[in-house]
Image (cartoon, grey):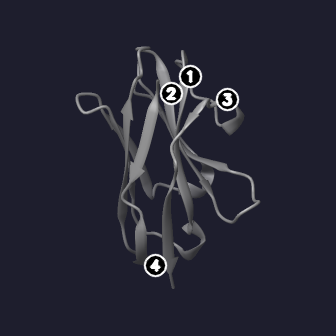
Amino acid sequence: QVQLVESGGGSVQAGGSLRLSCAASGITSRSYCMGWFRRQAPGKEREGVAYIATTTGNTRYADFVNGRFTISQDYTKNTLYLQMNSLKPEDTAMYYCALDLFRTYCRSDPVYYGQWGQGTQITVSS
């Protein structure tokens, strides 16, 4: 049974940095994508932030990231990271990690991700 647990959220001033972690367990496939998504307000659609493919190490980012965030994965610890720099108030959201099994090219639509963590809140003040 796959389990994803996020941590690292919190409150920060604009221009600050945070690093999110997502501890994964129960993944038996060696080929999958992991992504970070966010929901900026209750009832609003989740949007993709960044994605990484385990077999190739290829990464993709949403346009709004604009070089500010870096997604990475420590395979020895089964942990996914999102280093977030130059945070803006509009980055305030609940952030989730998610898993799309048996993929070598990561898709951006959250509908394709079958396993999700519980989320971690980031609040950026101006």
Tell me the amino acid under the disc marked 1. Tyr
Badge 4 or badge 3: first in the primary sequence: 4
Q: CA distance from mark 4 to mark 3?
A: 32 Å
Mark 3 secondary-structure assignment? helix
Q: Is residue 109 visible?
A: no
Tell me the amino acid under the disc marked 3. Tyr
Foreground mark, 1 or 3, reads 3
Please rate how many residues cluster around mark 3, counting C-alpha atoms within 10 Å: few if below 14, some from 14 to 19, many from 20.
few
Please rate how many residues cluster around mark 2, counting C-alpha atoms within 10 Å: few if below 14, some from 14 to 19, many from 20.
many
Pointers 3 and 2 in contact (C-beta within 8 Å)? no
Q: Residue furthest left?
A: 76
Q: CA distance from mark 1 to mark 2?
A: 7 Å
Please rate how many residues cluster around mark 4, counting C-alpha atoms within 10 Å: few if below 14, some from 14 to 19, many from 20.
some
Residue designated by label 3:
112
Pointers 1 and 2 in contact (C-beta within 8 Å)? yes
Badge 1 or badge 2: first in the primary sequence: 2
Checking the image for residue 105, the label placed there is 1
Tell me the amino acid under the disc marked 2. Cys
Residue designated by label 2:
33
Establish if 35 lies above or below 55: below
Badge 4 or badge 2: first in the primary sequence: 4
Q: CA distance from mark 1 to mark 4?
A: 33 Å
